[in-house]
Amino acid sequence: MSEDKPVRPNERVAALRPAADASLRFIGEIRTPWSDRALCPRQGSHDGPDCRLVLDPIWQPALEGLIDYPLIEVLYWLDRSRRDLIVQSPKGDGRIIGTFALRSPVRPNPIGTSIVRLMCIEGREVIVRGMDCLDGTPLLDIKPDRRSFTPKAPPKPGVD
């Protein structure tokens, strides 16, 4: 964790006990061109560079049917973010905003989300455009974009 990073003027931190109330299972990692937070885009762009969601081999069958959705939602763990800021000064100008009113990666549970364009699937790798995270970020989940998701009706008995 990164609680040891300096805080900006007027930012406040919380004194936190170690978290022990949930566990997450990373399903792979995200490969992007960005190794430094200063170079990473603040919001992804659907015309941005190709990025790869590299799933652990056991999860490859879970990709079945995903190609039917041009936009997908990617959830990821912002593992290099501090987790103790209550209010933040995102521009460093002294003005403060509550953490829950920001899309900052600095949050109690640093879960990032991006709606990305699905370009193709190559084995256990999902190639997308629109990511905004660092290379090697742990992957939590992939879902069809909720705005375009309509569950497929089950087949009717006797109809192929």
Image (cartoon, rainbow, N blue to C red):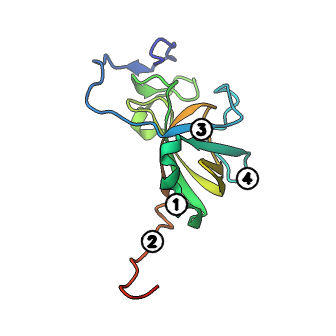
Q: Nearer the viewer, residue 154 or 95?
A: 154
The amino acid beneath tag 1 is Glu
Q: Which of the marked residues, 3 or 4, is nearer the chain's N terminus?
A: 3
Q: Marks 2 and 3, how far apart in space?
A: 26 Å
Residue at label 3?
A: 30
Q: Earlier in the sequence, mark 2 or mark 4?
A: 4
Find disc 1 in the rendering and name its residue.
64
Q: Which residue is the site of mark 4?
A: 47
Given residues 132 and 141, the one toward you in this image is: 141
Q: Secondary structure at mark 3?
A: strand
- Discs 1/4, front: 1
Amino acid, disc 4: Asp
- Residue 32 lies, with reference to residue 119, above or below; the image says above
Q: Which-is-in-front pick, marks 1 and 2?
A: 1
Q: Nearer the viewer, mark 1 or mark 3?
A: 1
- The answer to whether residue 14 is visible is yes
* Dot 4 alpha-carbon crowd within 10 angstroms: few under 14, some 14 to 19, many 20 or more: few
Q: Nearer the viewer, residue 96 or 52?
A: 52
Amino acid type, label 2? Thr
Q: Position of residue 75 (x, y in %)?
A: 48, 44
Tag 1 near tag 4, CB within 8 Å: no
Q: Earlier in the sequence, mark 1 or mark 3?
A: 3
Vertical placement of residue 157 versus 77, above or below? below
Q: CA distance from mark 2 to mark 4?
A: 25 Å
> Cβ–Cβ below 8 Å for labels 1 and 3?
no
Asked whether the residues under the numbered discs 2 and 3 touch, taking CB atoms below 8 Å apart as contact, a structural biologist would say: no
